[in-house]
Amino acid sequence: MHTSAHIIAAARGWIDTPFHHQGRLKGVGVDCIGLVVGVARELGIDIYDEAGYGRQPQEGRLRAALNEHLQRALTLAPGRVVLMQWHVDPMHVGILASHPAGGLSLIHAYAKSRKVVEHALDDVWQARIAAVYLFPGSDS
């Protein structure tokens, strides 16, 4: 059983890793799904990983993969994976954490920041959430 504290600690270990499309290496380069895959692997969670995807969403492919390989959750909580969308098709994922000032924060490989970052889950980011997931074998 993996606790939310284990998941968050693992995710925070990736902070400042440079953004790199399809990257999977802590400290070297990672994208948003690579962060989720990397955290799962660090915790010994067997999780599906797919290579060869483009930079733009592809007709529900990301949502379908998450639905197949993670467990859906109904509420936001630390240690959970969130799927986000800006337009029609969801195209980004991150991991929720407890924010030091209270509330939730989001850990994600963000192309605009050019690295893995953690920041408060404000109303703008929360409005982008399309689905919430649990890692297999987690208690969060």
Image (tube, rainbow, N blue to C red):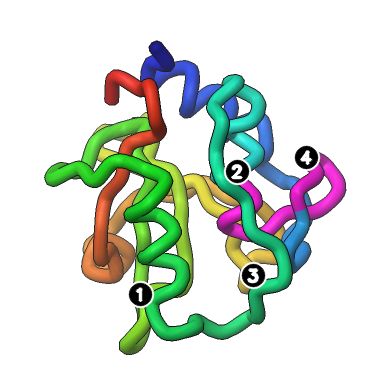
Spatial distance from mark 2 to mark 1, Cα to Cα? 19 Å
| Residue 83 at x, y percent in the picture | 36, 60
Residue at position x 78%, y 40% from top?
Answer: 26
Q: Which residue is mark 2?
A: 37
| Mark 2 or mark 3: whose residue is earlier in sequence | 2
Quadrant position of the C terminus in the picture: top left
Q: Which residues are magenta?
A: 24-35
The numbered mark at residue 26 is 4
Spatial distance from mark 3 to mark 1, Cα to Cα? 14 Å
| Residue 101 at x, y percent in the picture | 32, 34
SS state under label 4: loop
Disc 1: CA contacts within 10 A as few (<14), some (14-19) or many (>=20)? some
The numbered mark at residue 62 is none
C-beta proximity under 8 Å, tags 2 and 1: no
Q: Which residue is mark 3?
A: 111
| Mark 3 or mark 1: whose residue is earlier in sequence | 1
| Mark 4 or mark 3: whose residue is earlier in sequence | 4
Which residue extends farthest right? 28
Magenta span has 41? no
Q: Which residue is mark 1?
A: 85
Image quadrant of residue 25?
top right
The foreground one among 47 and 78 is: 47
| Mark 4 or mark 2: whose residue is earlier in sequence | 4
C-beta proximity under 8 Å, tags 4 and 2: no
| Residue 112 at x, y percent in the picture | 62, 73
Amino acid found under the numbered disc labelled 4: Lys
Vertical arrangement, residue 28 with respect to residue 12, above or below: below
